[in-house]
Image (cartoon, helix red, strand yellow):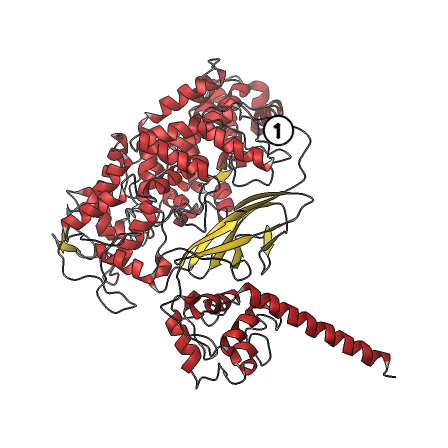
C-alpha cells in the first residue's frame, strides 16, 4: 500500500494536469488562428510588456525593447526574433523560450509574474512558437472597430459586478470575441476590472472603464449605486431641454436633485458667474424683495447685456490665448485684450472670432488678432495650442509616439504641425530686452507674415511631413494665406466633430463650475462626457444660435439645473459630476479680489495701472516686473490666489485650490486694512454714520454676502458693536466723564467713540471677507 499522502499528491497532480489540459483545449478553441499582428501583440499588451513603464519604454527595459503599445509589429518581431542572438525564442523547445519563461517567473524577471502557465496568454504564445513563430503578414486583416457591451450600466446594491463583452471587427468582415485579450483601465477607484472583463464594485459611484485592444480604444460607463430608496424621486419643474436631459440621468441613477436655491444665493451666483462681480447691496436687496414671478429670467436678461459680461469673457480668453507681457510686450497685451473684449461686446459669433485669429497676419499692434501667432512661435507649439484651445484635443503625447489614450499617431502630429510651418516674423522696431538672457522675451512691434520655406520634419521618418488637418486624409491645402484660410474654414465648420463641442463644453464649464467633459480641453473616446446627449443638444443649440455666446449662457442660466442649491441631500451628497446640486468652488483670483473691493468700497492698486481698474479688467499678467518695482497688494493677492502666468494655453494653469498661504493672506493682508482705513471706504463711512447698529450690520451683510443676516448673526454683531460704546466709555478719563461741559471734550469723546466703532465695523467686515460663504461660489 502506498502512503495516503502520496496517493493524495498523485490524485492532486492528476487533477491539475486534467484541468490544465481542459484549459488548454478551451484556449485553443477560443482562438483557432494565432497571428503576430493580432493575437501575439494583444498578449504583449495584455501582460503590460509593451507599456511605457516596461519594454515599451523609449530605451526598453532589461536589454529588451518593444514598440509602445504595439504600434510597430514589424519592429517588435525583429526585436523578438533577432535581438541578443534570438535567445528569447526557442523554436525547438518552445517552453524554454524566454518569452514564456520570464513572464511566468520560470526565470528571474524584474517585472514579476505577468501570466500563469494555464492562462490564455501562455497558450497563445506557446502555440505561436510551435507554429514556427511566423511574423507579420500582409494577408492578416486589420482591426476596424471595437464594440463593448454593456456600454452604460447602472448596478444597484446588493449586485456588485457586471461582465463586459468585447467584440473586435476586422477588415475581412470577420468578428472575434476578444474579451479575454482586451486591456481594461478604470478611471478611478470606484471599481476594479479582472483580466476577463468582470467589473467589481469597490465603492458607490461612477467610473469610466477604458477598453483597449490593439490600436483601438473605447470607453464604457459603469455606475454602482446604493439600494434604491422606496421613496419616489421628485424633480423640480424643468425649464428647458437641459433640465430634461439632466433629470433623465438623475432618475436613472436614483439621485434626487437638491432644492432650488434661495433668491439671495441665486442673485449672488448669477452676478459672479456671468459678470465676475458681486451685486451691490441695493441690487441684491431689490431682487430678493421683488415679488415678480419671473424675476430670475428678467435678471439674467439684464446681466447678459451689461459691459461686465465682456470683461469676464475677455479675461477667460486672455488666459487661453496667452496674453502676457513677456512675449507680446505691454502694448501688444493691451491691444490684444482690447480686441478680445470688443469682440464679445459686439456679440461677434465665436466661429468668426476664432477664424479672425487663425487667418490674422500683419502688425501685432495694428492687427491685434495677429498676436495669436506671436504668442505661439514654433510649428509644434502652434499645432498643440490650436488643437487644444479650439478643438479640445491634447496632442502632446503624439509628438514622441502614438497617443496612448487617443487615436492620434505620430504621423498625424507632424502632418498637423506642418500646416503651421509657413508663419514667420519680422521685427519692425528694435528695443532692448529688459532681460537680455531671456530669449522668450520680445519687445516692440512685430510683423506676422506668411513665408513658406519648408515643411516641418517628421521626427519618426526624418522626412518632410505632408500637411493635413486632424482626422482627414490630406489633400491640396496650398501654402501661405490659402493654407490658413482653409484651416479656419475646416476648423470652424459645423461639420467639424470637435470645434462646436469643445467650445460648448468650455462655456458650460465657466457657468456651471465643471465641464461635461473633464478636463475641459480633453475630448476623446476614452474620456466621454458625463451626459453625451446634453453635450450634443448644447452643440446643436449653439449652431442654431449662430455661435452667440450670450445666447447659450442665457440658456444655461435659465435652466432649473443652474438654479439648484449647493446643499446636498441623502442621495446626492457624493455626486460630483451629474449636476444634481450646484458645484462649490473657490472664486477665481480676480473675482475674489474684486468682490473684496466691492465690499470695502475701495479698489486695490496694481502696478502700472491707474487706480480704479478692477482685477477682472487687467489685460495681462503683470505690467511691471517685480524685480523692477515692489509688487502692490493687488498684484500679490492675484499671484497668491492662482492667477495664471499664461505660459500655457490651458484652463489647468489657473488654480482654484485653497492653500495655507491663502488663509494667512486673508487674515493678515495689510492691503485690506489700508483700504478699510481710507475716507472713501464703505466701512469707514458706515462707522462714522449715524445709522443704527442694526442697519449698519445689514448693509455689511448685503454688501458682502448679498443677503440679510439671520437672527443669530444679527444678535452677535449687535452685541459686538455695542462693545464699541463700552470700550469708548472706558477710554474717557473719569473727570471728563463727570463734567463733559466743553465742546472740545465732546469732540474728543466723539472721536474716541468713532475710532472704536470703526475698529469693530472693520473687524466685522473682515470676518465676513474670510467666511467660506464669501470666498466660495455656491
550 or 466, which is in the foreground? 466
As drawn, the residue found furthest toward the right would be 1
Of the 4 image quadrants, the one containing the N terminus is: bottom right
Label count reads 1
Position of 185 relative to 288 (above/below): below
Would you say 4 lies left or right of 301 here? right
Of residue 259 and residue 702, the one placed in the foreground of this image is: 259
Q: Is residue 744 above or below residue 419?
A: above
Q: Indicate the position of residue 628 as horizontal and vertical percent values.
A: 29, 53
Residue placed furthest toward the top: 291
Taking the spot 35% from the left edge, 65% from the top edge, the residue there is 400
Residue 701 appears in the picture as rendered = no
Is there any visible trace of residue 215 in the rendered image?
yes
Query: Mark 1 = which residue?
Result: 233
247 displayed left or right of 420: right
* 736 to the left or right of 404: right
Secondary element type, mark 1: loop
Q: Position of residue 540 (x, y in %)?
A: 36, 34
- Residue 140 x, y percent position in the rendering: 40, 66
Q: Residue at x 46, y 20 (%)?
A: 689
Q: Position of residue 69 (x, y in %)?
A: 44, 65
The structure residue drawn at horizontal position 62% and vertical position 35%, both measured from the top left corner, is 571
Q: Nearer the viewer, residue 673 or 752?
A: 673
Amino acid at each position: 500500500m502506498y502512503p495516503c499522502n502520496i496517493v493524495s499528491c498523485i490524485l492532486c497532480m492528476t487533477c491539475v494536469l486534467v484541468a490544465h489540459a481542459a484549459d488548454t483545449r478551451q484556449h485553443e478553441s477560443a482562438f483557432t488562428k494565432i497571428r503576430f499582428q493580432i493575437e501575439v501583440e494583444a498578449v504583449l499588451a495584455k501582460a503590460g510588456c509593451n507599456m511605457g513603464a516596461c519594454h515599451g519604454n523609449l530605451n526598453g527595459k532589461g536589454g529588451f525593447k518593444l514598440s509602445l503599445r504595439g504600434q510597430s509589429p514589424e519592429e517588435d518581431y525583429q526585436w523578438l526574433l533577432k535581438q541578443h542572438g534570438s535567445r528569447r525564442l526557442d523554436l525547438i523547445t518552445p517552453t524554454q523560450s524566454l518569452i514564456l519563461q520570464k513572464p511566468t517567473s520560470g526565470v528571474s524577471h524584474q517585472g514579476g509574474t505577468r501570466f500563469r502557465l494555464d492562462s490564455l496568454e501562455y497558450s497563445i504564445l506557446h502555440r505561436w512558437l510551435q507554429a514556427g513563430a511566423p511574423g507579420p503578414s500582409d494577408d492578416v486583416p486589420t482591426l476596424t472597430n471595437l464594440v463593448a457591451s454593456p456600454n452604460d450600466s447602472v448596478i444597484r446594491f446588493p449586485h456588485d459586478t457586471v461582465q463586459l463583452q468585447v467584440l473586435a471587427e476586422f477588415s475581412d468582415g470577420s468578428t472575434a470575441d476578444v474579451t479575454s485579450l482586451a486591456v481594461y483601465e478604470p478611471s478611478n477607484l470606484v471599481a476594479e476590472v479582472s483580466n476577463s472583463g468582470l467589473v467589481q464594485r469597490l465603492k458607490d459611484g461612477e467610473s469610466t472603464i477604458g477598453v483597449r485592444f490593439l490600436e483601438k480604444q473605447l470607453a464604457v460607463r459603469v455606475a454602482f449605486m446604493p439600494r434604491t430608496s422606496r421613496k419616489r424621486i421628485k424633480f423640480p419643474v424643468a425649464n428647458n431641454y437641459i433640465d430634461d436631459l439632466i433629470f433623465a440621468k438623475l432618475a436613472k441613477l436614483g439621485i434626487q436633485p437638491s432644492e432650488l436655491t434661495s433668491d439671495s444665493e441665486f442673485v449672488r451666483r448669477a452676478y459672479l458667474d456671468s459678470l465676475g462681480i458681486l451685486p451691490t447691496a441695493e441690487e441684491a436687496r431689490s431682487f430678493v424683495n421683488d415679488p415678480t414671478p419671473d424675476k430670475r429670467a428678467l435678471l439674467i436678461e439684464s446681466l447678459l447685456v451689461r459691459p461686465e459680461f465682456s470683461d469676464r469673457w475677455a479675461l477667460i480668453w486672455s488666459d487661453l490665448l496667452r496674453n502676457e507681457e513677456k512675449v507680446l510686450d505691454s502694448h501688444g497685451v493691451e491691444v490684444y485684450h482690447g480686441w478680445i473684449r470688443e469682440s464679445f461686446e459686439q456679440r461677434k459669433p465665436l466661429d468668426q472670432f476664432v477664424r479672425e485669429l487663425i487667418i490674422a497676419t500683419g502688425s501685432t499692434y495694428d492687427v491685434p488678432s495677429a498676436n495669436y501667432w506671436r504668442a505661439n512661435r514654433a510649428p509644434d507649439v502652434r499645432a498643440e495650442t490650436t488643437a487644444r484651445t479650439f478643438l479640445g484635443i491634447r496632442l502632446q503625447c503624439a509628438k514622441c509616439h502614438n497617443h496612448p489614450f487617443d487615436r492620434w499617431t505620430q504621423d498625424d502630429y507632424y502632418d498637423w504641425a506642418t500646416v503651421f510651418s509657413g508663419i514667420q516674423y519680422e521685427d519692425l522696431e528694435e528695443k532692448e530686452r529688459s532681460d537680455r538672457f531671456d530669449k522668450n522675451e520680445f519687445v516692440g512691434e512685430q510683423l506676422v507674415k506668411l513665408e513658406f520655406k519648408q515643411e516641418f520634419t517628421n521626427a519618426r521618418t526624418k522626412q518632410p511631413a505632408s500637411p493635413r488637418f486632424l482626422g482627414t486624409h490630406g489633400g491640396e491645402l496650398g501654402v501661405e494665406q490659402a493654407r490658413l484660410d482653409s484651416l479656419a474654414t475646416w476648423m470652424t465648420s459645423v461639420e467639424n466633430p470637435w470645434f462646436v463641442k469643445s467650445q460648448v463644453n468650455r462655456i458650460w464649464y465657466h457657468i456651471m463650475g465643471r465641464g461635461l467633459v473633464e478636463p475641459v480641453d480633453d475630448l476623446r473616446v476614452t474620456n466621454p462626457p458625463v451626459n453625451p446627449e446634453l453635450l450634443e443638444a448644447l452643440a446643436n443649440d449653439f449652431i442654431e444660435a449662430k455661435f452667440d455666446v450670450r445666447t447659450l449662457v442665457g440658456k444655461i442660466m435659465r435652466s432649473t439645473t443652474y438654479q439648484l442649491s449647493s446643499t446636498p441631500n441623502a442621495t446626492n451628497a457624493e455626486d460630483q459630476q451629474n449636476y444634481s446640486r450646484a458645484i462649490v468652488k473657490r472664486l477665481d483670483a480676480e473675482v475674489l479680489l474684486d468682490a473684496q473691493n466691492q465690499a470695502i468700497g475701495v479698489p486695490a492698486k496694481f502696478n502700472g495701472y491707474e487706480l480704479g481698474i478692477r482685477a477682472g479688467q487687467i489685460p495681462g499678467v503683470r505690467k511691471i516686473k517685480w524685480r523692477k518695482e515692489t509688487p502692490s497688494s493687488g498684484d500679490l493677492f492675484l499671484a497668491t490666489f492662482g492667477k495664471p502666468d499664461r505660459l500655457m494655453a490651458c484652463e489647468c494653469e489657473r488654480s482654484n485650490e485653497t492653500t495655507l498661504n491663502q488663509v494667512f493672506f486673508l487674515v493678515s493682508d495689510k492691503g485690506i486694512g489700508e483700504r478699510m482705513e481710507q475716507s472713501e471706504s464703505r466701512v469707514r463711512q458706515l462707522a462714522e454714520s449715524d445709522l443704527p447698529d442694526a442697519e449698519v450690520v445689514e448693509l455689511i451683510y448685503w454688501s458682502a454676502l448679498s443677503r440679510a443676516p439671520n437672527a443669530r448673526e444679527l444678535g452677535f454683531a449687535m452685541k459686538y458693536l455695542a462693545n464699541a460704546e463700552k470700550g469708548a466709555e472706558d477710554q474717557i478719563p473719569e473727570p471728563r466723564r463727570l463734567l463733559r461741559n466743553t465742546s472740545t471734550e465732546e469732540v474728543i469723546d466723539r472721536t474716541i467713540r468713532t475710532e472704536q466703532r470703526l475698529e469693530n465695523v472693520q473687524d466685522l467686515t473682515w470676518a465676513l471677507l474670510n467666511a467660506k460663504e464669501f470666498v466660495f461660489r455656491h
